[in-house]
Amino acid sequence: MFSSGEDEMATAQVGTTRRAPLSRDRVLRAAVALADEEGIEALSMRHLAQRLGVVPMALYKHVAGKEELLDGMVDVVVSEIDPPLEAAGWRTAVRERVLSARRVLLRHAWARPVIETRTGASPVVLDHMDSLVAMFRGGGFSAVLTHHVMHALGSRMWGFTQEVFPSAPPPEDPELREAMFRQVVARWPHVAEIAGAGAAHRTESVVGGGCDDQFEFEFALDLLLDGFERLRRQDWTPGD
């Protein structure tokens, strides 16, 4: 049996174990976990404080406010991207780095719209961009061509692209779906033709099966990489 003094010491040790010291890293990772589980709309300083078992004001010692919290969450997500492949050609290294970014974004569904709203690049974000630039420069790309290549990659360096006019899901009712399809064929026959051709998509992919946003992402990425290589071999400059 414990003496009263030993009981008090054991209780204090349990309390210390249960409550880890609050830190910026702990705050950011708790925010990422909350957004993963409940969506970015559920994220607030108050809700996050409740999850951490602290008062909301305690969070402001580590993040100045909601926007800084979101910036830090992006850093946590970007830090999950696999490191560059060693001893790989530029094309393989870039492709795998971009596809790793896509896998990370698929794990954190809330991250894409948050990344799109950021107004500045943090050191973590710049590290990722710098690593991609280094792959192109190490592969023989000029600084000028690499500048344009990075613009062409755009949001793909973060693992996503934006559809300008994404297609709405068809009605679940078979009769309504058939009626809608007839209307589309009658008015927009060429759109209907290529939409039907999408059934020929392959199902295997780097990340997994399905239609494939993944297939379309890799298809466009490979087209870009092939084009980059052609320009590199031509010693392309903007005046060409």
Image (spheres, helix red, strand yellow):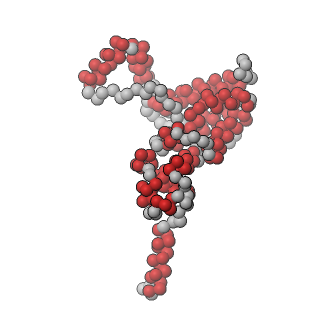
- Residue 136 on image: x %, y %: 69, 33
The residue depicted at 40 percent of the width and 19 percent of the height is: 196
Q: Looking at the figure, which quarter contains the N terminus?
A: bottom left
- Residue 116 on image: x %, y %: 52, 38
- Residue 36 on image: x %, y %: 45, 48
Total count of labels: 0
* 58 on left or right of 91: left
Against 224, is 69 above or below?
A: below
Against 8, is 101 above or below?
A: above
Q: Looking at the figure, which quarter contains the C terminus?
A: top right
Out of 140 and 208, give the one closest to the viewer.
140
Q: Is residue 73 visible?
A: no
The residue depicted at 64 percent of the width and 39 percent of the height is: 129
Out of 43 and 15, give the one closest to the viewer.
43
Q: Is residue 58 visible?
A: yes
The residue depicted at 66 percent of the width and 26 percent of the height is: 228
Against 60, is 221 above or below?
A: above
* 96 on left or right of 89: left
- Residue 162 on image: x %, y %: 50, 31
The residue depicted at 55 percent of the width and 60 percent of the height is: 61
Q: Quadrant of residue 118?
A: top right
